[in-house]
Amino acid sequence: MKIHEFQAKEVLRRFGVPTLKGIVATTPEEARRAFADLGGPVAAVKAQIHAGGRGKAGGVRVVKSAADAEGFARQILGKPLVTPQTGPQGTVVRRVFVEQGCAIAREHYVGVTLDRTLSVPVMMACAEGGVEIEEIAKKSPEKILREAFDPLDGLRAFQARRLAFGLGLKGKTANSCASLLSALARAFRETDASIVEVNPLVITQSGDPLALDAKMAFEENGLARHPELEELRDLVEEDATETEARKTGLSYVKLDGTIGCLVNGAGLAMATLDVIRQHGAWPANFLDVGGGASKDQVMAAFKLLLGDPRVRAVLVNIFGGIMSCAVIAEGILAALREVSLKVPLVVRLEGNQVEEGRKLLAGSGLSVKTAASLDEGARLAVAAAGGGKG
């Protein structure tokens, strides 16, 4: 789950990360009042969307008057902002964050995420801030400093100081920066975050470190422990189909292809996506109904697939262990009674109660193609969808 910059800063402040004062505005008039209330000679007006690259896309502007703040807010509010992370359609800006300015001496990058190779969190830092860290990682990976730390013990004080010194900081500034880095690591651990990123982390002309920007995302499976974070969810920024899937307890991720997939088990689902790619097409989604899904969940899953206008064929790939193939078949038939089947359907069933499931489908009168293996199922689905076109 992603949250907005202004929300991330609220979370980080609770852990002791210093930030500047800012006010959220949803109208140009509110942006004007926000600038006046901040009381400074300069402020930054920032579009609030769940995507990076806002500055380069024209979504951030430094203003020196209330009129300029209002004018820029009027220019971007209610309009799509296109960044490398939004795709060509962009994301509509519904709010801006008006933040007081500061005198910047230096800009750095810091972030915390999970190192999946080491299976531990890692804090990264780079002396070059305010730029795309991915580009630095590709062109000059040696510039990125890393400190892996124990998920229970957290970032040690000597590790935080080593990173601060590695950024070229000294004295009081290095100590203050080390404290900020320790606070970021605590925020990462104690909120079950998947990423905490500050880009840029600035050093003011007075030598104080500040989080000038902030990005946080959280592990969905950990949100049950953090109802206060769940309240920060902005459903307008999220895919409506994924939101509906979450309500019914389904694991669904929207993708860009044309083959709708309904599978039980994350591993089998990933294998299904891979085999579809091997046959030259792209999957339209990742959808795992789990090992113990009910008939109602299967019906909800099937409705999600058929409600996607990009889907040209549906592949059901079920290996029944705990899950009964008969339950899958009943769910499919129940869904098709409510939603018209306008695309080819390929079903591969194997395992628990497979014969009962096959009989239900065979006696349904529906035009269902059956497959004996995953490879055959993927091949049939791709062919039914018109091959790799898309």
Image: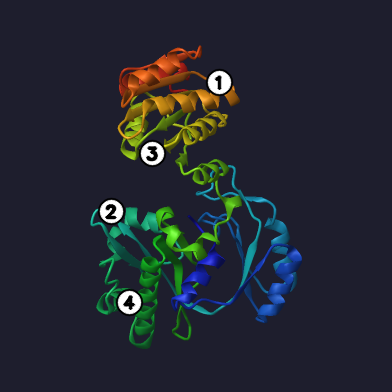
Q: Label 3 belongs to which residue? A: 290
| Residues under numbered marks 4 and 1 in contact, where contact means CB atoms less than 8 Å apart | no
Q: Residue at x 47, y 44 (%)?
A: 249
Question: Which residue is identified by label 1?
Answer: 341
Q: Position of residue 232 (x, y in %)?
A: 55, 61
**Distance in Å between CA atoms under marks 3 and 1:** 23 Å
Circle 2 SS class: loop
Q: Please tell me whether mark 3 or mark 1 is closer to you in this view.
A: 3
Relative height, residue 205 to residue 336 (above, below): below
Inter-mark Cα distance, 2 to 3: 24 Å
Residue that numbered label 4 is attached to: 164
Which label's residue is closer to the chain start, 2 or 1? 2
Mark closer to the observer (4, 1):
1
Amino acid type assigned to the residue bearing label 4 in the image: Ala
Q: Secondary structure at mark 3?
A: loop
Task: Give me the disc on residue 116.
Answer: 2
